[in-house]
Amino acid sequence: MARLPPLNWLRAFEASARALSFTAAAEELSMTQSAVSQQIKSLESAMGRALFLRRARGLELTDEGRGYLPTVQAAFAMLEEGTTVLQSRNHPDVLELQVNLSFALYWLTPRLSQFMEENPGVQLNLATSVWHEERASDAASVQIVFGLGKREGINGRRLTRDSIFPVCTPKVARQIKSLDDLRKQRLFDLPGTAQSWGAWFKAHPDGGTVPVPTVHRASTWALSVEWAKRGLGVALAHETIANDLLASGELVRPFDFSIPLKEAYYLIAPEGTRTRHASKVFKDWLLREMAVFLG
């Protein structure tokens, strides 16, 4: 890996290249003209090529200098943006939110405009995760995770009590009149969940002796439900991720039968004096909306 030149050399280069003047760059950077000139010489020596042509009437970038400038400017822009984001995390109106991907996509996003309209001063920084164990974020002030509650329920508040049922497009549903018809379809689900198609078939009054066909698995409902929306087959789903799609008619339930979902979504958020304004208003809004959703 190439050794990077010192940051102050690059800053001197960027300022000089913008102004095409060591004197102007020195004024901008609160340095002497000779110091800027020396840093440019050091950078050119380290790079092994000239970046400026010194003319009687001023500076001119070489071809190498013109090619290098956008890279340096982009790097400084990224540093400034990253620093701003990091510093803003301590602001009371910045909400660092980590949400299970499927919950964020199918439940939160359709309702998010209402939260933003009610709280225009809150800046939302949202990161998604598939499984809580995979990408727990130290920066997140509020988390919405999916699990059995053995760990999530200790520090969190249970949000949902869902059931499991098949979903598919209306076109696919017209091909399904019985469990045998269902078995002929492609079936989609997730690995690692407490219940899958085997549990649903076993619990069905007519499904105990029906062999379960091959199940295609995706890492998240965001993918398996999308497959169902595309008409590729039938996915197992639950109310939190499916109700809006069912209400819109994009998906339907070919069978009314469902079984209780052992897992649930949990809200993990600070309490009392540790709660920042953005976290508090989001938590209050979320619980209010969830109460409406659950009826």
Image (cartoon, rainbow, N blue to C red):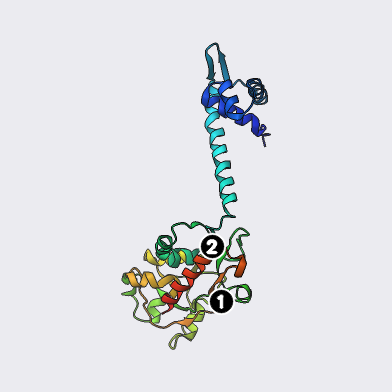
Percent position of residue 21, x then y: 55, 21
Q: Residue at x 37, y 69 (%)?
A: 245
Q: Residue at position x 41%, y 65% from top?
A: 111
Viewer-side residue, 3 vs 234: 3
Give the camera-side residue of 200 and 289: 289
Residue at position x 64%, y 29% from top?
9
Mark 2 residue crowding within 10 angstroms, few (<14) / some (14–19) / many (20+): some
Q: Position of residue 89 (x, y in %)?
A: 58, 54
Question: Is residue 168 visible in the rendered structure shown here?
Answer: no
What secondary structure is found at the residue carrying circle 2?
A: helix
Question: Nearest the camera: 176 or 266?
Answer: 266
Give the mark nearest the N terminus, 1 or 2: 1
What is the quadrant of the N terminus in the image?
Answer: top right
Cα gap from disc 1 to disc 2, whole angstroms: 36 Å
Judged left or right of residue 17, residue 8 is right
Q: Mark 1–mark 2 contact, CB under 8 Å?
A: no
To which quarter of the image does residue 255 belong? bottom left
Residue ID for mark 2:
277
Q: Where does the image place residue 72, in percent across and percent down from the top left?
A: 57, 33
- Please state which amino acid type lies under the numbered disc 2: His
Please tell me how crowded label 1 is: few (under 14), some (14-19), or many (20+) other residues with Cα within 10 Å.
few
Residue with the mark numbered 1: 194
